[in-house]
Image (cartoon, helix red, strand yellow):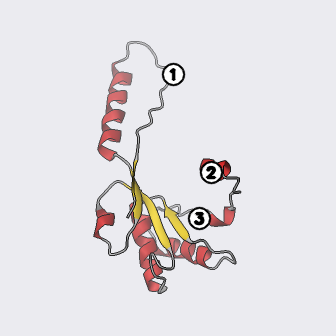
């Protein structure tokens, strides 16, 4: 929402869809995509928060004969190279999974080895990379 606020664009809650099971159930992903494409002011692009959901969304769009990227652009978060396998150009924000796990392990070991009760916790931000395809 920070980017939208920066350009004085209001958040349209109709554009935000939740799939509580993370794409595990195809019907859930299909319902979210159908709701988006059936809006009066449908979006030009869909940003998806996970590889499994991205795959499911592409399957739904293909089933509905919606061309990616000609009719709908798709982008998302990714921790794997699976998006490179698709014929569709899907841009993604790459999360450094190995580095995230390494940092989490280091922080956990510090907590375990602490001689005193820990009452303050740190938040670490690890940079992501944008891959435009």
Spot occupied by residue 131 in the image (x, y as percentages of width and height) = 37, 57
Q: CA distance from mark 2 to mark 3?
A: 15 Å
Which mark is on residue 120? 1
Which mark is on residue 17? 3
Quadrant position of the C terminus in the picture:
bottom left
Which mark is on residue 1? 2
Compare marks 2 and 3 and give the one earlier in the sequence.
2
Q: Nearer the viewer, residue 67 or 18?
A: 67
Compare marks 3 and 1 and give the one earlier in the sequence.
3
Q: Residue at x 63, y 75 (%)?
A: 42
Q: Callout 3: helix, strand or loop?
A: loop
Spot occupied by residue 84 in the image (x, y as percentages of width and height) = 30, 65
**Label 2: how many residues lie within 10 Å, few (<14), some (14-19) or many (20+)?**
few
Q: Nearer the viewer, residue 65 or 25?
A: 65
Q: Residue at x 51, y 20 (%)?
A: 119
Q: Callout 1: helix, strand or loop?
A: loop
């Amino acid at each position: 929402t920070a980017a939208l606020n920066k350009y004085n664009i209001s958040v349209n809650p109709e554009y935000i869809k939740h799939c509580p099971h993370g794409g595990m159930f195809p019907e859930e992903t299909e319902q979210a995509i159908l709701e988006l494409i059936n809006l009066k002011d449908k979006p030009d692009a869909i940003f998806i928060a996970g590889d499994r959901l991205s795959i499911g969304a592409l399957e739904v769009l293909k089933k509905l004969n919606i061309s990616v990227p000609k009719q709908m652009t798709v982008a998302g978060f990714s921790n794997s190279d699976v998006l490179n396998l698709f014929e569709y150009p899907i841009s993604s924000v790459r999360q450094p999974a190995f580095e995230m796990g390494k940092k989490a392990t280091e922080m956990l070991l510090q907590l375990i080895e602490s001689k005193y009760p820990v009452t303050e916790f740190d938040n670490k931000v690890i940079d992501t990379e944008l891959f435009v395809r």
